[in-house]
Amino acid sequence: MQALTEELDELTDRLEAELKTCKESGCQYAENEAEYRKALRIAILNERQKGTPVTIIGDVCRGQEQIAEAKRRRDCSEAINVIKLRIRMVDAQITRIWNSGDTTQGGFL
């Protein structure tokens, strides 16, 4: 019983750490996404003012170094999906242990 309690405590700590990481990563993703979209919109408006054909405007703008870098940062921030998967895995471990019938306590989560 003691080993089970310790394992549940360890998994709970891991879950809390993953949730904190997810929150921080989510905030960074939102900032990077906003930066990318803002830079892209400004570039598109500038290209429209120059008379660049609408059909190629997006390609022209995405080829600009600052926009490409903003997109790279945004894409890297999408690692939040990996963190969400880790959270689901830890939660599943906790649920599996809790539902194993080895505990006499009430609900865990």
Image (cartoon, helix red, strand yellow):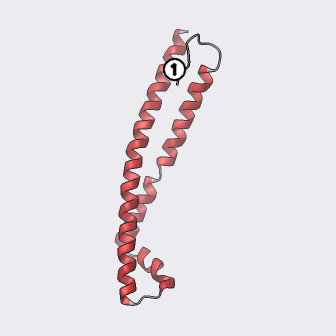
Q: Is residue 48 above or below residue 82?
A: below
- Position of residue 105 in the picture relative to residue 14 (left or right): right
Judging depth in this view, the residue of 102 and 65 nearest the camera is 102
Location of residue 41 by image quarter: bottom left
Residue at screen point 58% across, 10% down: 104
Q: Is residue 98 above or below residue 19?
A: above
Q: Position of residue 43 (x, y in %)?
A: 36, 77
Q: Report the quarter where the N terminus lies.
A: top right
Query: Mark 1 is on which residue type?
Result: Leu
Seen as rendered, the residue at the extreme front is 106
Whether residue 32 appears in this view of the structure is yes
- Position of residue 60 in the picture relative to residue 90 (left or right): left
Location of residue 47 by image quarter: bottom left
Location of residue 33 by image quarter: bottom left
Q: Position of residue 34 (x, y in %)?
A: 38, 61
Q: Position of residue 9 (x, y in %)?
A: 47, 20
Residue at screen point 43% across, 80% down: 60
Q: Which residue is mark 1?
A: 8
Judged from the image, the secondary structure of the residue bearing numbered disc 1 is helix
- Position of residue 8 in the picture relative to residue 38 (left or right): right
Whether residue 69 appears in this view of the structure is no
Residue at screen point 43% across, 42% down: 22
